[in-house]
Amino acid sequence: MSEAKTAPQKTIDVSSQSKQDLQVDVEQATVGVPFCENPKMSMRNVNVFYGDKQAIHDVSVDIAKNEVIAMIGPSGCGKSTFLRTLNRMNDTVDTCKVSGNIQLDSDDIYQKGLDVVELRARVGMVFQKPNPFPKSIFENIAYGPKIHGLADSRVDLDEIVEGSLKKAGLWAEVKERLHQPGTGLSGGQQQRLCIARAIAVSPEVILMDEPCSALDPIATAKIEELIEELSQNFTIAIVTHSMQQAARVSNRTAYFHLGKLIEVNPTEQVFTMPEHQLTEAYITGRFG
Amino acid sequence: MDNLPKIKRSLKRRSRSETRFRWYGRIAIILGLAAVFTLFVDIISKGHGAFKATYIQLEVHYDPEVIGINSLTDKSLLMQANWDAVPKQALRNSFSDVSGRRDKRKLYKLVSNGAGFDLKDRLLANPDLFGKTETRWILVDDDIDTYYKSWLDGEPYAARLSAKQVQWIDQLHQQGQIRLQLNTNLLTRGDSREPEQAGIRGAVVGSLLTLLLTLMLSFPIGVAAAIYLEEFAAKNRFTDFIEVNINNLAAVPSIIFGLLGLAVFINFFHVPRSVPIVGGLVLTLMTLPTIIITSRAAIKSVPPSIREAALGMGASRYQVVIHHVLPLALPGMLTGAIIGMAQALGETAPLLMIGMVAFIVDIPQGFTDPATVLPVQIFLWADSPERAFIEKTSAAIMVLLSFLLIMNISAVWLRKRLERRW
Amino acid sequence: MESSNLFLLMLTLGAVAFYIGRSRSLLVAKPLGGIRHLHSLPNYYGLNALLWCALPSLIILVLWLIFDEPVINSIIMGSLPADIAPASLADYNLLLNKISNLADGIMSSKGQPASLIAVADSMAGLRVISQWSLTALCLILAVIGLYWGWYKIAAEFRARQSVEKVMENLLLGCACLAIFTTVGIVFSVLFESIQFFRSVPFFDFVFGLDWSPQTAIREDQVGSSGSFGAVPLFVGTLLISAVAMFVAVPIGLMSAIYLAEYSGKTVRTYAKPALEVLAGVPTVVYGFFAALTVAPFLRDLGADFGLTISSESALAAGLVMGVMIIPFISSLADDVITAVPQTMRDGSLAMGATHSETVRRVVIPAALPGIVAGVMLAISRAIGETMIVVMAAGLAAKLTANPLESVTTVTVQIVTLLTGDQEFDSPKTLAAFALGLMLFTVTLLLNIFALHIVKKYREQYE
């Protein structure tokens, strides 16, 4: 399972590229290097159904410790759905069914006895649109530690809050107004607040679902900086629409197409010499 | 991660807390549903008996000598005839062994006070019975009725009967001459001091007349006001003031409207008390806010694209409203009107204030006849001491609730049937 | 002519006007080459004529009918000969009734003083004059209006505009009815209350601790006590309302939370309407239930435990009132809870919070303004509730905080004071209006405050 699989090479006939050739062969496995040694999270043969509609087809991939893996692909290709299986947020949708094996370290996260509460403390999430609670900035950050019982005293709590805000690069901007509502911040600040909130429980993995799509370029740049810093201590899986962003922040990039994982390769390779024709078609802008 | 053990420790407590919380929710719903259940079971168990009344079988002889008249044509003679003597004689014949004035009086109490008049009506409807005898089921007095029903249920309540009366009833039962029959009085008669003769027809007709008046006044005015506010009113402080007023009126306690009706309609305008007109006026003022609010919602739901299309064709604003908006908003408005009427039907407090509380025996024939309404009738009967009235009150409540159920179901049905998906 | 016949006549004339107007417009249109040369459709010309004909006369008719009697009464009573002049307010009304009955011929004039008969005759005469002048006026107005409407018909006449203007004013009038109602309520209640406060000082009323409204029937019964201290009533009202809230808020709120957050679709489809049924039951039914089932049950239950629970206890009335209010709170809470955006819940769940933690710490605080407003509206409802307390609570004013005892409320007293045989103007009946004023003010303030809370705190999380 920890060996890099090499897929059978498929000759790319450049001359006869047409829309029809962009159909995906069901039998073909993921090209590139989807797997690695001692992964932080590993997924095998994951299928996700919304009622009768299948959103994710037989995806297998590993996420290495402290890596940043970006997931790209055209709209509706299942990247967000896939991300949400990693912390079982799909449980909140009634019609969603997940099959396959997903492991965090060596725990199957879909096993019967597993407490999803603990899982989500270990795998945090940042959403597309910033969603701070209607509480003060302090209370937003303190929420996680409070419910999980991580702080024994008010002093501890203060430390955790300060630490998280510093790690998220927000401390300097808000330290004078910790008790004002979190909703009073700008969009970019709110998103960093949400990141700080996620960090406050010291998760092992942070999932980010298009975290910058609602932000302006300057705020985006700040967050991309942050992701780089965070990757030293956290494993990060980020879904993004922007190929440039993926190129800037990630170690590996995974390309999704219509619910299938087409290619996983080091980022630089994906954007300069993609292995699969579909990947190439996407990054050259032929669709998506 | 060093936080993990801490997190694991908190899991158990939190999971217990979660289960407890869910149980609180379930218990709350169960309590709420139990309240509904208890209420309905209580009312139905108390009231279903009232739809049947106890009758005894007697041989009735329409004896001209006993009645005291020799023809049925002279109206004034009919008034003065001794109708009570007919059932009394029938009872004496059935229980020929009863003697002595006291016992005889007890015997006569077996049947209802109005038995004589019931027989008179029967005779007038079938004049060829004059002078003849027939077997007839006669309505009993309410004390007997209560006793017999309670005896059938297994817990006889004989507090208001003498031992002899109990014995006679037993005798009648052995002979198969006492039974429960459909109680026609309940639905055909108006109010009465005697429980066995009391019916809800007067109150039902009164309610109908009052509601009709309320509907005829509040629906057009409410729709007109809603149209004005939605389509024509400029966004200024005056319009805001009107809206604030409407929203406040919707939340004013109903008894205040009663005070208003008393002070303005009765005292200032001298509208007679106790008639459907004044009841209708007061209820109109009460339902108006509801109808305005629901009509506005219905008008708002018509998409602006239709209005724009009509305006683009050169229709004036009024024509847009009358030809396009109103027909499309009408289902929603009707639903709101039905719901408003259902609320008005159940209102009691304001009508108490304006006097629709009198003891009215006759069935009202028009808007200016004194009348009462069903909820007030229920209120009045609830005060009466006779046990038989408990049964009747519950039955009247059942009738009221059925009306409300029908109205609410038709509102829901109407909404589903005529709803459009834009 | 009788008013109802006059009314019908006006309507008929209006119909005639419509027909005439319409026909004339068609006639005018013909030589021009068709109705498209007219400014408005023929129906509008007809309508215009109808409105000019019928509307002024109908307005006069209605106004005349309203003010007819008061005006005649004041004329008659203002010029009474000295020997039958009334000595007091009560006598005034009695006298007026007498004269009116004499004039109508209901009462026979045998044995009445001659001056009284003369006054009655003049009243009868005035009434006849009034009726005839009304008929004449209406007819004249109708005919003039008809002629005017007919006269104005021409191709360029903007009949539609004219009709629509009238329509707009009619609609405005309907909308203003809401204001008139409020004004009517405020005025009538205020007016009578001010009269009341002339005999019973305001502070005695609002802060007095003794409520026993036994007043003199006749004026010369000076010195009979009638204390109108309303504090026991306020306390009684609050006590019962508190019991009701104690029942309704937990059950209503928790069932709303469960139905909105936890329950499956089937439970929600059936349980929600079932709870809403409680809202549709008339209050008189609740009163009956409270008085005949709940109160005896509680009394017997108390006896089993050695407690004396009154058979008109605040507990019984409050309990049933609470049941009535449950759907109120439950549906308002449900609305605000479902309005909290899902992304807020997702944010909390993604952090590893349990569902109940999310609800308790994120959803409810976010929905709190709406919930508080809902509770305030429910309190307002409880305070103003009448039938349940009339049937299940007591009549004696008692100053107590013990729900096992019998208390009376503001609404019960309003009903008792006004459904007696009292003269309209005695302090006893006026007290009812003063109580009504208190009730109206408090509920109004609660409603305004509730609305204000929702407006002010809503923007905090959007």
Image (cartoon, helix red, strand yellow):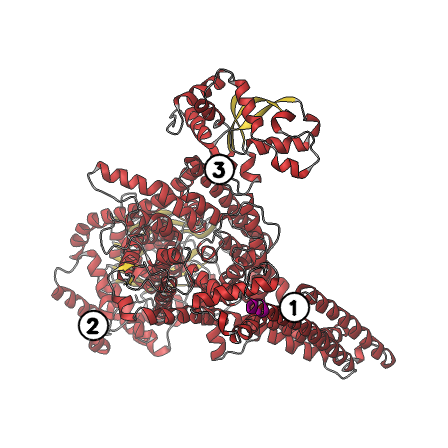
**Image disc number at residue B24:** none
Say whether mark 3 and mark 2 are on the same chain: no
The residue positioned 48% from the left and 37% from the top of the image is B195
Write down the residue under mark 3: B194
Closer to the camera, C380 or B25? Answer: C380
Q: Is residue A258 left or right of residue C146?
A: left
Q: Is residue C317 above or below residue B182?
A: below
Quadrant for residue B34, please give it.
top left
Q: Tell us which disc is closer to us: 2 or 1.
A: 1
Q: Is residue B322 left or right of residue C441?
A: right
The residue positioned 17% from the left and 58% from the top of the image is A150
Q: Is residue C240 above or below residue B168?
A: below
Mark 1 — on which chain does it sit?
B
**Image disc number at residue A166:** 2
Say whether mark 1 and mark 2 are on the same chain: no
Is residue C354 something that shows in the picture? no
Task: Residue A231: say if magenta.
Answer: no
Q: Position of residue A87 (x, y in %)?
A: 31, 55
Of callouts 3 and 1, the N-terminal one: 3
Q: Amino acid at mark 1?
A: Ile
Q: Amino acid at mark 3?
A: Glu
* Residue bounds of the magenta highlight: C114-119
Is residue C11 something that shows in the picture? yes
- Indicate the quadrant containing the N terminus of chain B: top left, top right, bottom left or bottom right: bottom left
Q: Within 10 Å of the Cα at label 3, are there few (<14), some (14-19), or many (20+) other Cα atoms?
A: some
Please tell me whether mark 2 sits on a helix, a strand or a loop.
Answer: helix
Q: Is residue C8 left or right of residue C309?
A: right
- Mark 3 vs mark 1, CA separation in Å: 54 Å
Write down the residue under mark 1: B322
